[in-house]
Amino acid sequence: MDHLLVLVRHGQSEWNLKNLFTGWKDPDLTEKGVAEARAAGVKLKALGIRFDVAFTSALSRAQKTCALILEEIGQPELPVIEDQALNERDYGDLTGLNKDDARERWGEEQVHIWRRSFDVPPPGGESLKGTAERVLPYFRAHILPRVERGDRVLVAAHGNSLRALVMELEGLSGEEILKRELATGAPIIYRLDASGAVIDKKDLAA
Ligand SMILES: O=C(O)[C@H](O)COP(=O)(O)O
């Protein structure tokens, strides 16, 4: 039986393009983002991958990415479960600010700590640890059981909510996961055994 789990970060959003902290704000995909999502679908189709269920966040950039992938692989009617547990990390007071302006205001190092430390939250927002504390219980309760019973599962979400999942699946430390940049629209394909342990990984960005 195929215990398949595919993770995809949404394609480029309007705010990625403008270099703004996005978090829980809901900008649309850019044209490039739409193309990236479609390209992810084309790659999965070429590998003969089909899904039984898809999960995505409550944010449209991830939902659209999910829908475009499903359209490309010829499964536009597949059930899609949306949940805010899979949303991007909440960037708090940084939301909507330009990342370069923030570096000028608070310094390169402080902004790097907010973006890439494991447990230091940005002001009013979530650290990666905090993000993982809502993503992982949802994953264990709703996604992993589907994979374990043999459903082929797609998860279209965000840079930091997916980091939490990659950390869990690959057994990485907080420090190791922060070095991993997840490319937009690049599927990571995991095959798991029946107990949920990863036996094979293919990162289509690599
Ligand atoms: O929310 C955002 O701004 C991005 O999607 C992720 O941002 P980061 O690369 O600063 O974590």
Image (tube, rainbow, N blue to C red):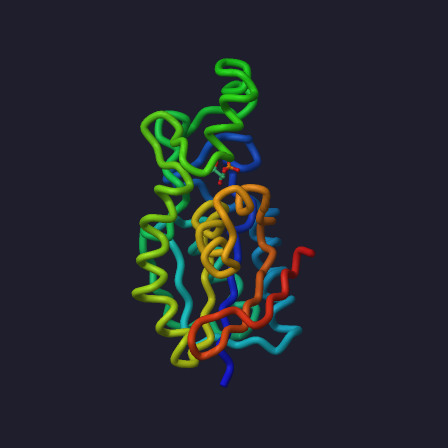
Q: Position of residue 193 (x, y in %)?
A: 49, 77
Relative to 142, say whether 114 is above or below.
Answer: above
Can you name the residue that lies furthest to the right here? 206
Can you name the residue that lies furthest to the bottom here? 1
Residue at image coords 57%, 75%: 49
Image quarter for residue 141?
bottom left
Q: Position of residue 37 (x, y in %)?
A: 57, 56
Relative to 52, say whether 35 is above or below.
Answer: above
Q: Position of residue 175 (x, y in %)?
A: 52, 42
Residue at image coords 40%, 58%: 56
Residue 88 appears left or right of 188: left
Q: How many marks?
A: 0
Residue 72 appears left or right of 22: right
Residue at image coords 60%, 66%: 201
From the viewer's side, name the closer residue of 87 and 72: 87
Can you name the residue that lies furthest to the top here? 105
Q: In which quadrant is the C terminus drawn?
A: bottom right
Q: Position of residue 115 (x, y in %)?
A: 49, 33
